[in-house]
Every structure is written in C-alpha cells, then in structure tokens.
Amino acid sequence: MADSPEARKDWMTGDLMPQVYDELRRIAGAQMAREQPGQTLQPTALVHEAWIRLGGDGGTAWKSRGHFFAAAAEAMRRILVDTARRKAQLKRGGNPERVELAESRIAAPVGDDKLLLVHEVLDRLAAEDPLKAEIVKLRYFIGLNFLEIGAALEVNEKTVRRHWEVAKVRLLELMDA
C-alpha cells in the first residue's frame, strides 16, 4: 500500500516531528516494554535520541511513511544495542541505587545479553533475507502488528505473517549455532 502523492509530500517536508512524535513515543514505549526493570533509558529519551540519529528536521527526504518508520526502527534498535553493550562492559560491583520511574515499570523484560544475541543473529538474517530481517525489526524492536508492518513495507499482511513465522525459526537456528 503506497503513500498517496499528497502524503508523500508531507514526508518530504522538514517539519516532520509534530506529525510523527506521538507514534514514535508509542513505539518507544512498546520497545521499552521488552527491557529489564530499572532501565535508565526512558521512552522519551529513546525517541529524542532516534530523532537526532535520523537527522532531526534536517530536511531528509523520506520516500514514504514506511521508509521513515523503518529508519526509526533501525535507529531505536541501534540505540538499545549500544546501551546494552555499554552496560555489558561495566564491571560488576558497586551496587548503585536504582530509582524506578512509572515509565519503566513494564512487564516482559529482556536482558542485555539476549538483546545483544538478537542483534547479532538479526544481522546474519539480514544478510540472508533482508525482508525477513526488516519484519523482525519492526515486530520485535518496535512492536508493530502484522497489518502495520505490511503497510510500512508495502507487502500483504499474509506475506508478513508467513515471513515472521519463517524468520522466528531461522533466528532460533542461528542462536543455537
């Protein structure tokens, strides 16, 4: 499902942040749901960091909504992976005081080690099948549903579901290798 010419013009304007902020914030919140409690990175900070990495309102000509959100997914993934790597490098000990904020009290935590492993195997999957890797990024790192992924990648929802099932199996194989 391609964007209309009018919608495409909106994506090429420099004043994009007001158009996408709420959606990016929702996506970041969903992504943070997979993080461990006590995460120091908050959804708002994740959105702002991703925005900076995307070039902000620097006039990047986004081809479509899907193009922008695919780039946002990749930026958020890299930010979370970078954060996990920094944490993994810190030596144990010290026991710093952690303060739980309402935004970070979310179920289903994912450990830094698991996040780094998913990142590694996702890169290998991308080399084998870029479409499946993109579906995994949008589903796992952003939390989009199959219909949203189909719209973003301009493929049928059934195709997205089929690729998702195959990608899950392949990722498990790569993790075990």
Image: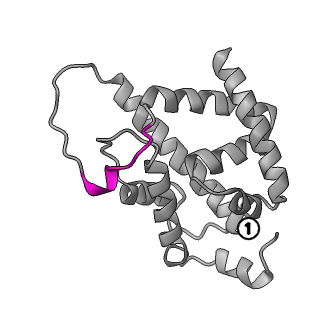
Residue 50 position, x and y percent, is 48, 55
Vertical side of 132 occupied by 72: above or below: below
For the residue labelled by badge 1, is the local secondary structure a helix, a strand or a loop? Answer: loop
Q: Which residues are magenta?
A: 101-109
Residue at horizontal 59 percent and vertical 70 percent from the top: 59
Query: Horizontally, is 85 left or right of 98 in the view?
Result: right
For the image shown, how many numbered marks are present on the structure? 1
Name the residue that disc number 1 marks. 63
Would you identify the image quadrant in which residue 176 lies? top right
Q: Give 156 or 117, whichever is nearer the viewer.
A: 156
Vertical side of 37 occupied by 51: above or below: below
Q: Give 144 or 66, whichever is nearer the viewer.
A: 144
| Amino acid on which the number 1 mark rests in the picture | Lys
Query: Horizontally, is 177 left or right of 55 in the view?
Result: right
Vertical side of 64 occupied by 9: above or below: below
Residue at horizontal 64 percent and vertical 21 percent from the top: 175
Residue at horizontal 19 percent and vertical 40 percent from the top: 98
Quarter of the picture containing the N terminus is bottom right
Residue 127 position, x and y percent, is 76, 32
- Residue reaching furthest front? 107
Q: Is residue 94 visible?
A: yes
Quarter of the picture containing the C terminus is top right
Q: Is residue 57 visible?
A: no
- Residue reaching furthest bottom? 6
Chief SS of the magenta region? loop
Q: Dot 1 surroundings within 10 Å: few (below 14), some, or many (20 or more)?
A: some
Q: Give 106 or 25, whichever is nearer the viewer.
A: 106
Residue at horizontal 59 percent and vertical 48 percent from the top: 74
Q: Is residue 129 magenta?
A: no
